Image (cartoon, coloured by chain):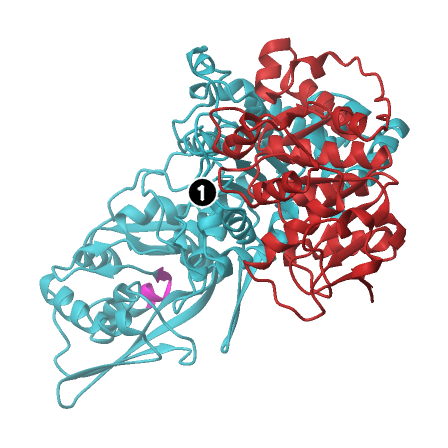
Chain colours: A red, B cyan
Amino acid sequence: MSFLRRHELPPLLRAIHDPPRRLYLRGAGDTEMLSRPAVAVVGARACSPYGTQVARMLGRELAAAGVVVVSGLARGVDGEAHRGALETDGHTVAVLGCGIDRNYPAGHAALAQAITERSLLVSEYEPGVEPAPWRFPARNRIVAGLCAATVVVEARERSGALITADFALEEGREVFTVPGEITSALSGGTNALLRLGATPLTSAADVLEGLGLEAQPRPATTHPLLELLPATADELVRATGSTPGAIAAALAELELSGLAAEGDGTYRALA
Amino acid sequence: MLARAVTFALVGLEPRRVEVEAHVQSGVPAFTLVGLADRACQEAKQRVRSGIKSAQLEWPGNKSTVNLAPAELKKEGSGFDLPIALALLAASGQIPRERLGEHASCGELALDGRLRRVGGVLGVAEGARRAGLERILCAYDACAEAALAGVEPVGVRHLAEAVAYLRGEAEPPEFIAGNGKPRRAPLDLADVRGQERARRALELAAAGRHNLLLGGPPGIGKTMLARRLPSILPPLEEEAALEVTRIHSVAGLIDPEHPLIGYPPFRAPHHSASTAAIVGGGPRLRPGEASLAHRGVLLLDELAEFQRPALEALRQPLEDGEILVARAAGSVRFPASFQLVGTMNLCPCGARGDPGAQCTCSAQRIARYRDRLSRALLDRFDIVVTAPRPRASELQAGRGEGSDGVRARVVAARLRLAEAPPSRTPAADELLTRAVEGLRLSGRGRAKVASVARTIAALAEAGDVEPEHVAEALAYRAPPDLAT
């Protein structure tokens, strides 16, 4: 286990107004990774299937384009962003709100382990420090501080993800927001950010452009079902007139090719 | 004088011969019942005394002792009333002893001497047949049940009738043999509108005897669908029907007019059920819901609300098809090869998966809710389907296909699976391998997909399992957030 002293911190993080005294590191990833272009992907823990899929897709596409995906290892959006990044050859950094030796939440122990294999877990807290509610906002300033841009995927009106966005704005970093449904409480925070002037994000390319990077071209898809998504399997049966069995088979093929994903019964295109 | 009547005690489902010995001798009038009789059985003394007097027979006014042998076997319940009364009457010379010895008997006496039906008559009758006794004396309305065992039932309504018959003074009333036509529950799949995927999953579950988990917000018809699963299952074969009837008989659940259970039983215990209620046991070693659902369907509605120990106890029968209830005095085996159907909401508030409602559950609450099901139990579900709330337009659609049509396909597919199970083509194998890597399927997950794919192929009347069958089976795997 190693740590960086304040003067060793990556430049972006050193530039914030109260940088951590020390930054503990865990994982096989190179420390140099922290100085590479990074984007924070944050959002609600109890996110909707939509949030899950957007976070995963952003994590994957940003990492594939060579951006380090930074998040907080929490359930929901954070975890999905890490997972998406791990699906590629790219890198991801998880900032913990507890001692560097702890895996919190416990349900993400396997995810944390996967991150240490190629990337990094970081924390400003020495080993043994318990997670505490007031440590998470402090952790969020590091998430925002490490990154040139922050993407908020889904957030309720008083979400911790908004704290991250606030830190980013204070430091003059870019904030992107994924637009959500106006009827959903999970869009309350993100829509408020949009009203305040955050840039709406409609694809990973929006962020990458600002960083001077290019998105990896997506494989061209022509599957007719993709155009009908999001939809439930039953809706597709009725829209296409196919049998439930044929629709199920087609959807499973799309899932296997990484072109669609199911959440709570609704299939969405991952494009 | 000494006399003996024969009956059978059930240990689990197994009949054990019990000799009811009565000894009437001179002495201070007293009535003693020995031979490890439980409370209900001890109370036989009062019922037998009143019953004999009500039948205008003579109560042996001397010192009477009744012994239930073998003495180390626990005797439970009220079925011993009739043999006790008959043994006493024979010992006091009121009925011929030899004739009594040719009959088995069982039944509960009312205070006025009438005979009541008890549970387990089928088991007692089977014990009689195996012991070489050709006739069984029992309550009149238990005749049809006793006849299933292949012995001749002598049904009597009153103790006096039994005595008259044994004395050779009167023939017993003729009984009308139970018809062999049990009834099916009047639920039809045509009542379910929309829910194409869930209906398909139900058909697959029926054809392949797969365990099925239905998820979705409340009110979308999960329970309604699950309750219609028996309507698309083929009727039971004769041997199986008898086996099921035996279990239900012990639990006292037999319809006296239609004793044979010819259709797959359906059991839906409430989620407050205890472990003993579900897997069986308890002080009287009764079969639990899992055994009552043997060769049928066990529906656990609101799966996540069940007590965790009760659910975990189901893992053994799901694996072995039977339940071994172990007691200090020995163990009892109940068959429990059932098809498990579970329903659950996607979150504790129920709004998840419902576009018209807002789920207010925190991430931890959802995780806790799903954690109530162990990975090991979820692993036993071969088909997992999440059904979202249908739109209003779906509900206006006409009635769906009826159960009869679906059942015909299910029967054909089962025949095909039994006679010539389709095997995977190389292309299907390759897809399965790709899925194991791409979707991170476990070994058991792979086996489940393979088995469901075989059912899909059989339903499609295909000779081989093609890639499209594997692909469809993949769509019914457990979602990763439920499986981890």
Magenta-colored span = B98-104
What residue is at 88 percent from the left and 40 percent from the top?
Answer: A89
Along the line of sight, which residue is nearer the eye, B25 or A175?
A: A175
Q: Residue furthest bottom?
A: B27
Q: Is residue A78 left or right of residue B125?
A: right
Which element type, helix, strand or loop, lies under badge 1?
Answer: loop
Along the line of sight, which residue is nearer the eye, A131 or B165?
A: A131
Disc 1 sits on a residue from what chain? B
B103 within the magenta span: yes
Along the line of sight, which residue is nearer the eye, B237 or B469?
A: B469
Q: How many marks?
A: 1
Along the line of sight, which residue is nearer the eye, B74 or B154?
A: B74
- Disc 1 designates what residue? B301
Give the percent coordinates (x, y) of residue B415: 67, 29
A254 within the magenta span: no
Q: Is residue B372 left or right of residue A2?
A: left
The residue carrying pointer 1 sits among few (fewer than 14), some (14 to 19) or many (20 or more) residues within 10 Å by Cα, namely: many
Which quadrant, please, contains the N terminus of chain B? Answer: bottom left
Q: Is A12 placed above or below A136 here?
A: above
Q: Is residue B400 left or right of residue B85?
A: right
Residue A60 appears in the figure: yes
User: Based on the displayed image, in which of its 4 quarters is residue A245 positioned?
Assistant: top right
Give the percent coordinates (x, y) of residue B72: 43, 80
Give the percent coordinates (x, y) of residue A106: 64, 59
Q: Is A246 placed above or below A134 here?
A: above
Q: Is B178 placed above or below B43 here?
A: above
Give the percent coordinates (x, y) of residue B297: 51, 41
Q: Amino acid at mark 1?
A: Asp
Q: Is A220 placed above or below B49 here?
A: above
Residue B246 appears in the figure: no
